[in-house]
Amino acid sequence: MIGIVVVSHSRPLAEAAVGLAAEMVAEDKRPVIAVAAGLDATTFGTDAMAVSEAITSADSADGVLVLLDLGSAILSAEMALEFLEPDVAGHVRLTSAPLVEGLVAAVVTASTGASLDAVVAEAERGLVGKQDHLGDSPAAAVAPVVEADRSVEVVVGNEHGLHARPAARLVGVVNGFDATVTLTDLDTGKGPVDAGSLSMVATLNAQQGHRVRVGASGPQADEALAAIEKLAAENFGDEPAQKAAPAASGSGLDVAIGPAVLVGAGVDLSGYVAGDNELGRLDDALGAVADELRELRDGTAEHGEIFEAHLALLNDRKVLDDVRTAISGGASAPAAWSEAYDGLAETFEGLEDGYQRERAQDVRAVRDRVLRALVGATSAAPVESGILVVPELDAATAATLDATRIAGIAVRAAGTTGHGVIVARSRGIPLITGIGDVEVPAGATVAFDVRTGSFEVEPDEDRVRATITERRDEREQAVVRADEPATTRDGRTIDVVVNVGVVQDAVDVRGADGSGLVRTEVLFGDRRTPPTVDEQVETFRAIARALQGKPITIRTWDIGGDKPLPFLPQAKEANPFLGERGLRVFRRRPELLRDQLEAIRRTAAETPVHVMFPMVTTADEVAWALGELGPRDGLEVGIMVEIPAAALRVRTLAKDLDFVSIGTNDLTQYTTAADRTNTAVASLADGLDPAVLQLIDHVVRNAGVRVAVCGDLASDPQAAVLLAALGVTELSAVGPQVPLVKARLRQADLSQVDTVAVLAARDADQVRGLL
Ligand code: PEP
Ligand code: MG
């Protein structure tokens, strides 16, 4: 390995530069770096004799590279060569490379065992990344890159993108192979660039979440690609942020009363006086909010991805440019900021995809957080006890509320699939959505009951409190008996299991007979890179352990529609719910499914595991999935029935299966042609629509195998009785509902349920009446 010498007028300067460069590579890989700087620790100057001594101490058979700062440093170094033995002086190179950037590039490149020529070339390209970024790049310095024979795609998971240290690790790995490796940022179209050059990797400026195509050619191309994929999966060696324990949960009741706390009606800007440093004020506010969001991200165990997304919204370069331009044109910081983020929210609202549309509320949450910072108001979510009345519920508020103090949340908007709603439900906070424009004076007593769909201002408090006591007793009794089996009065035992989206769901639940649905795309939904087989096994194991080794049903990745996976970006589709969802995606990317199946098989060797495939339409797909799975070795295998075609031909599909599980959420949306994320058609998408129930009945009669239900219908105790009466033997519900569903089943006599009348009913309301 070559040696490196730094010649500078200032010793602290040289030592700091060496410290920075040394950070980039592991200690055992660092080249020898000697310093000849200053006349002493504090006096500026250079000394030829000290330079020659430094060269001697860093000397190696592979050569020595000398980096220099100004004027006399060069003269001293040239003179030093004359003091050296000719054979040593013969392999010393003085370089005009920039001191800091050149030194960093030289240390990284030297650490890979590169030749003196290669290190010199890399040091001299040290400025390229910066020049390219600032738009003053003399692109001539860029070496041509050869066409790659093969390639893989990786996603940059690192918070700050492929910044200096991860880039240095990548270069280190690349240069360890006899291969030419190139990188292309598929999100910006930049590249290909030489992955063996730190400065060229810097020009790529690949940010977090960007997909990068890694191309390789040469004798060790395959090995290089495998090593880079592994490195990318490990976040290029950066530590993931440590997450704290989850916040306490709420009462889990569906009824609440308390004084109305009106939130989110906008930030009061009336006291704001614009000054002559609006840009500076904006930057201060942005810095404070970024700190706040990072703290929230690192302090929440399960919902960190929300704040990650908010950070990305905060740093949207295009919008920030617009804001700065408006401020430079005379606008105040709050006015410019509001206008730009209102525009961004409108853009989201205009998108076709329901999931994307709901992100508008995230934009408004970020907008208000910055406005509050600008006016000096506190950004923390309100902690008053009472019922929060909010126009919409952003996930940040839902995740940071003190769930032990808040009585409930009433959301004016009707959406039920927003992040905020999902987070609040998973935390057991009583929540009603869709209360509309009803006038609520601040501090007035309000109450809601999700079971009856009522929201009242100044209700009859005694009546509401009696209902709350009743529901609390009901819940407590159900929880006390939660571990007992759900055997109906006519002697049928139904397995009541839990839906798991985060490990905590399995930890918190009481009385579950296992899990009927582990949503893997939710479990790993905050990952920017695919989880490794080991990571998946570890997570599945944790779920099984939390459920005391009872059977868990792991659903393979169900992405698409309203569920994106950051590490598996999908092309924009006109009708995502009718497009590449679930199993359909993996005929194109089978390797991701194979890894998951491997993890499932490994977990199944230790604990009872069932596997099921989502979004199945045809028998061909079942055959393909079973082929990918290979030998079953005792693993029970099933599919989800959530498409009407699958329900109708379930006998054919289930021929080689052990069970089917009905996904009523999707089965309902596909049967009624009512998008599950579109509030305008929410009343059509009713799981108790007799058409949906007829399909369920058909599945039970024709499947020839065990039939489960894992859609949300199974979480409704009344509907659970009906499903059991139709012949479903396993119901998978959200955690807080498991004891209630079991309790209701124990009270039921299934033979008394008039299923004939239910199936012949005119509509969902009539079904409810019959129940
Ligand atoms: C369903 O569709 O009912 C289901 C359980 O799957 P998901 O809600 O995850 O699509
Ligand atoms: Mg589904």
Image (cartoon, grey):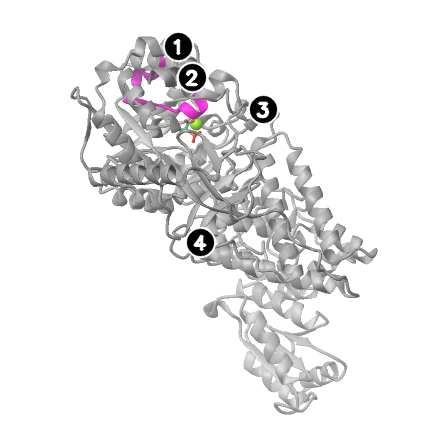
Disc on res. 761: 1
Residue at which label 3 appears: 575
Give residue 208's position: percent from left, percent from top: 57, 50
Closer to the observer: label 1 or label 3? Answer: 1
Closer to the observer: label 4 or label 3? Answer: 4
Closer to the observer: label 4 or label 2? Answer: 2
Q: Nearer the viewer, residue 353 or 415?
A: 415
Within 10 angstroms of label 2, few (less than 14), some, or many (20 or more) residues? many
Marks 4 and 2, how far apart in space? Answer: 39 Å
Tell me which amino acid carries mark 1.
Ala
Q: Is residue 652 above or below residue 46?
A: above
Q: Is residue 323 magenta?
A: no
Marks 1 and 4, how far apart in space? Answer: 46 Å
Within 10 angstroms of label 1, few (less than 14), some, or many (20 or more) residues? some
Marks 4 and 3, how far apart in space? Answer: 34 Å
Residue at which label 2 appears: 764
Residue at which label 4 appears: 300
Q: Look at 64% across and 65% down and name the residue there.
A: 117
* Residue range (magenta): 648-667
